[in-house]
Image: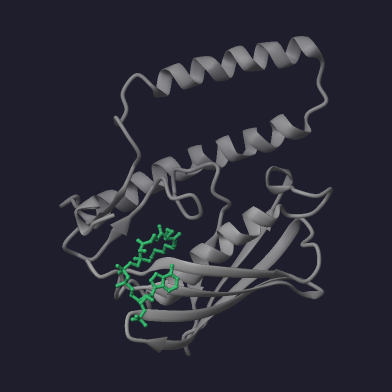
Amino acid sequence: MSIGEFVHDETPSSEIDRLEALYRPLADAVRDLVDATIRTTVDDATIRRTQADVEALVARLRARQLDGPAGVRFNSEARAWNWGNAVVGQRNALAPPLHLVRDPGGLLHADVVLGAAYEGPPGLVHGGVAALLLDHLMGETASAGHSRVTLTGTLTMRYRRGTPLGPLRLEGRIDREDGRKVYVVATLADAEGVTVEADGVFIVPRWA
Ligand SMILES: CCCCCCCC(=O)SCCNC(=O)CCNC(=O)[C@H](O)C(C)(C)COP(=O)(O)OP(=O)(O)OC[C@H]1O[C@@H](n2cnc3c(N)ncnc32)[C@H](O)[C@@H]1OP(=O)(O)O
């Protein structure tokens, strides 16, 4: 990976805001479609008709599109956008609707509601999904408000008990720093308390 893959793009922030407001409801609708596909109990004919409808919608969107992934772009106003990001991509229906909030004092938190699409053991969040969300929150924590690039070096999870699907809270903070290494601790919790603890080393890469 190199800094060359972060693309400088002079689209004004106001236009990015407009596009995000346009695409976010589409991503929300597709996310809802994923949930509906998992949980529907309609008859066979309705499933086949729906499949044909969805294929037609896909063909409509594919009429014009990028050759590859959306990438990470930024403008001179320090506005960055990463529409395909697996956790916070505004156009990515696979990404849970995670909204990160930076608290005074350096804590970063996010509230999220995980539904049927994130299941592992019955009724519980998939362990890899828990790691995905924590990894992203911890990377954002280490980057200290996007003031530096950090990449996950080592990530350790301790699954204390199953995490039920439903409303959850993530919290992360920097524990300590040592040169280019940023040590971050984080938790995933439900209403009863912490379900997963994580600690990780996030590295400011040599090329940054
Ligand atoms: C704001 C956006 C938030 C996004 C959050 C999402 C986070 C992610 O998922 S990032 C994607 C997953 N991670 C990756 O792909 C990273 C892949 N690995 C790499 O690119 C490199 O190995 C990288 C950057 C981690 C280290 O490379 P480099 O900068 O050359 O490190 P290097 O100079 O060898 O080592 C620097 C220090 O880090 C330590 N270190 C290097 N790699 C690791 C590691 N994997 N784990 C722990 N420590 C490490 C070294 O021991 C060294 O320590 P010291 O200074 O005490 O000797």
Task: Using the image, determine if residue 107 lies above or below residue 118.
Answer: below
Can you tell me which quadrant of the image ligand 1 is in?
bottom left
Q: Residue at x 64, y 60 (%)?
A: 130
The picture places residue 15, in percent across and down from the top left corner, at 26, 49
The picture places residue 72, in percent across and down from the top left corner, at 31, 52
Q: Residue at x 24, y 51 (%)?
A: 5
Q: How many marks?
A: 0
56, 138: nearer the viewer? 138
The picture places residue 2, in percent across and down from the top left corner, at 24, 56
Question: Is residue 38 found left or right of 9 in the rendered image?
Answer: right
Task: Using the image, determine if residue 19 lies above or below residue 170.
Answer: above
Which quadrant holds residue 145? Answer: bottom left
60, 140: nearer the viewer? 140
Question: Is residue 185 found left or right of 71 in the rendered image?
Answer: right
If the image is split into quadrants, where does the N terminus sit? bottom left
If the image is split into quadrants, where does the C terminus sit? bottom left
Q: Residue at x 80, y 62 (%)?
A: 162
22, 55: nearer the viewer? 55
Question: Is residue 48 found left or right of 95 in the rendered image?
Answer: right
Task: Using the image, determine if residue 33 lies above or below residue 52.
Answer: below
Q: Residue at x 81, y 21 (%)?
A: 42
The picture places residue 115, in percent across and down from the top left corner, at 71, 48
